[in-house]
Image (spheres, grey):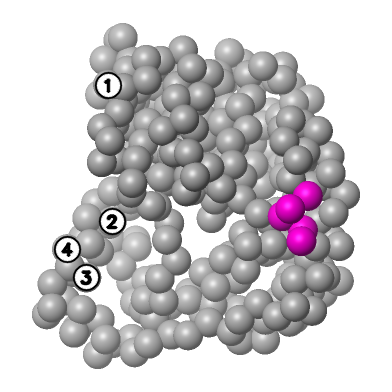
Amino acid sequence: MTPDFLIIGAAKSGTRWLADGLAQNPACFLADTEVHYFSTYFERESAGWYAAHFAAARPDQLRGERSNSYMTNPLAAARIYAAAPDARLIAILRNPIDRAYSGYCMRLDRAKVTRDIAAHLDPANPLSRGIVENGLYHRQLSGFLALYPREQLHVALYDDIKTRPAEMLGEISAFLGAPHVFEAGALAKRANARKASGIPHVYKRLFKPLVRTERVRRAISDAVSGTAAGRAALRLISGTLTYPPLGDAERRKLAAYYADDVGRLSVLAGRDLQAWLG
């Protein structure tokens, strides 16, 4: 059993919001999010393991999944094409400068980087490569378009979540060939909103392996943080984390780094994205 569509990225760009929105449509079935089969788990898990994520789908539903690592993994495109050459691909993209900063903050939250933001967001510094290269969207999508025809790729923008969420989901539904049926309340929900949880890396390392299913982890996290006692407990073990601001110098360096890729992406997406660099 293979998917009919995949949300392939980009990370920190609203993929969870999009998956949650499509899951409200009865015509779509979304696997437990962040499967990462064609990237992280391809050599560890079987095709049967992957197919099991869609076992609960009805025969009349379009089966889909989202794994934001697919865009950045150099092997994912060929693996996906070999398994699902007729699948539709969705990429939702965010201003790469803002995405890089969000990615830095996430890594700081997980104690994977230091507070030296200038070093970690400097394209000339090898330390920053794992953060800033994730925003080279045109380069990443070119790997998919070397295999898939352009009509099987839909490019959406994170900006549209705030300004035209209903129209955006309608366009994606049309791309998938699904009716546009959504609950109005679902469109107002923001996903992946960055919060300074301050939960130390050791806490996350202990928690994540215990519950592999993301929706269960999310439910537990929401339950704990949704009560006064839970929030007090988290404060006791974590304290408050603040993020260094993104300075003008860092923003200028990133704008210069992304300029060529954004120009090419504007042509691919059919939208002028130069405002991202301003």
Residue where numbered disc 3 is placed: 225
Label 2 with label 4: CB-CB less than 8 Å: no
The residue sitting at 53% across, 55% down in the picture is 12
Label 4 with label 3: CB-CB less than 8 Å: yes
Eye-nearest disc, 2 or 1: 1
- Secondary structure category for the residue under label 4: helix
Magenta segment: 274-278
- Secondary structure category for the residue under label 2: helix
- Secondary structure category for the residue under label 1: loop
Residue where numbered disc 1 is placed: 26
Q: Measured from the top left, where is residue 239 in percent x and y?
A: 34, 89
Q: Measured from the top left, where is residue 96 in percent x and y?
A: 68, 56
Residue where numbered disc 2 is placed: 218
Distance from disc 2 to disc 4, alpha carbons, whole Å, reads 8 Å
Is residue 223 left or right of 191 when viewed as pictured? left
Image quadrant occupied by the C terminus: bottom right
Label 2 with label 1: CB-CB less than 8 Å: no
